[in-house]
Amino acid sequence: MTSAGARRAFVLGGGLAGIAAAFGLRDRGFAVTVLESRRWLGGRAFSSPDPATGWTLDNGPHVMLGCYRATRALLRRLGSEHAFQQDRRLAMVSRDAAGRRARLSLSGLPVPLAMPLALVRLPLPWRARLRALWGMAATLGGAPAHWTLADWFRRRGQVGLPDAWLWRPLCRAIMNVEPELASAADFLATLREAFAGRATTAAFWVPKRPWGEILGEPARRALAAAGVEVRLGARVAALPVSGGRVAAIGLADGERLAVGADDLVVSALPWFVAGNLVPGIASAEDPRAGLASSPIVSVFVETPPGAPPLPDDGPVVALVDGDPFHFVLRTPGAEARRFALLSGGGRVFDGMPVAAIGELACAQLPRHYPGFAVGPGARVRVRKEQHATFVAAPGGGARRPPPGRLPGGPANLRICGDWTATGLPATLEGAARSAAMALADLPS
Ligand SMILES: Cc1cc2nc3c(=O)[nH]c(=O)nc-3n(C[C@H](O)[C@H](O)[C@H](O)COP(=O)(O)OP(=O)(O)OC[C@H]3O[C@@H](n4cnc5c(N)ncnc54)[C@H](O)[C@@H]3O)c2cc1C
């Protein structure tokens, strides 16, 4: 419970970063209020009921890696770490548009030893395997800030098969844009983090439950138990500044919360909102200074009972040369008839009706799974998230302020969120880590 006279802190936004920040502030003795515009917590990692099917659908499939330490610590606190299939080592099947199949499977050795052994076993011509090996070694070297990942491919001999079978699927999974747009330095930094340690750090953690049950609901209960006030449906509309401090928080319904001289305001708002609200952050609408958004489109499919199911290659399958869908994902333990297709970063779906998107997804599958067809009677649902991630483009560092106090910004304001400069692209781990970084200098 909050002790009388405790310093107050307002957390703006109840996504993963806001939830982590609220716990962090509470642990430091603050009386915390979370202001979240939606009727639930969890931000982009949310799920919602689909009335037409009765399914609970995620905003899109989210996969974690064993190296997501800050996220796992938060999930432990929420009691939901067990809601994942926790692989011990990385294994992933890829299928190209001619139906060829390859399995990248690491042993239990540390990744720097296991990865070369796995790469030489890929069913690619030996020259391509050697080039991929050389590329993996070259990741240790980093890249200049102005290079795209496609520049890195060219300069490190990774075009052709290594690009298609190894690097492009990894880039899509990590960066949610094509290599032609992605910052090589950010991609390589993330890869080094995932691939430099024990086998478990590079392994997938795939949720077995909808994200609402993993994050939003448990967070609501745990924050309440910790004495944090959570106000849902509270849309922050203004942050007036006076005397170099945020003086009040204006809500969209007209309510005005006074911010006292000792109170702290922590913005955990996404970039496309913070840029219009938080003094000192560039608007996402300003192409010279703001961050651009990258969409994710997910198509959830259930084939009819009795129809031949889609071959089950594990929870994550990369569709090599996949156009427009790049991955097939399965929820561990779910019926074999159910799976999802995911497309990240493409603008091809902008303005396209959901029925047409579903048809595109079903039409693509037989190219990667020869002989398979989504027959009549299949149930298909589509989720589109326009602001799934920000684009981590070359030289984007200047567009990502460090988590914490904004240089020259209001003295009582801190910022966090996956888009702040955590060294990671838009990920759950970036969000969790940003909250810890934003509060690091506060006495515990
Ligand atoms: C479909 C999809 C798939 C993804 N897949 C992966 C994956 O596989 N692995 C991975 O690591 N990451 C993945 N991500 C990215 C991951 O979800 C995000 O990086 C992470 O959830 C961001 O958390 P956050 O707290 O920084 O921001 P958000 O989750 O965006 O939280 C911000 C919160 O602020 C609230 N808010 C907005 N405006 C206001 C306002 N005016 N007033 C009050 N509250 C407001 C929002 O409602 C939201 O709850 C995926 C994202 C999507 C959409």
Image (tube, helix red, strand yellow):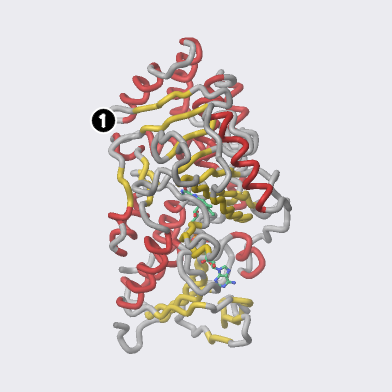
Note whether 317 is above or below 125 in the view shown.
below
What amino acid is at disc 1? Gly
- Residue 424 appearing in the image: no
**Residue 70 rendering spot, x and y as whole percentages:** 35, 54
Residue 298 drawn at (x, y percent): 56, 49
For the point 52% across and 49% down, the residue is: 300
- Residue 68 is left or right of residue 285, and the answer is left
Q: Residue at x 34, y 44 (%)?
A: 66
Image quarter where the C terminus lies is bottom left
Q: Between 80 and 167, which is closer to the camera in this rendering?
A: 80
Answer whether residue 324 is visible to the viewer in this image: yes
Dot 1 lies on which element? Answer: loop
* Whether residue 237 is situated above or below residue 337 in the rendered picture: below
Name of the residue lying farthest toward the left:
108
In the image, residue 438 above or below residue 199:
below
Q: Viewer-proximal residue, 236 or 221?
A: 221
Question: Could you say where residue 318 lies in the image, as x and y percent from the top left?
Answer: 49, 34
Residue that appears at 60% across and 65% down: 274
Horizontal side of residue 340 vs 292, given as left or right? left
Residue 153 or 100: which is nearer the viewer?
Answer: 100
Label 1 Cα neighbours within 10 Å, binned few <14 / some 14-19 / many ≥20: some
Point out residue 191 in the picture as x, y percentages from the top left corner.
44, 36
Q: Which quadrant is the N terminus positioned in? A: bottom left
Quadrant position of residue 152:
top right
> For the point 48% across and 57% down, which residue is it?
58
Q: Give the residue at mark 1.
A: 108
Most foreground residue, 428 or 149:
428
Considering every residue shown, the one lying at the far top of the view is 126
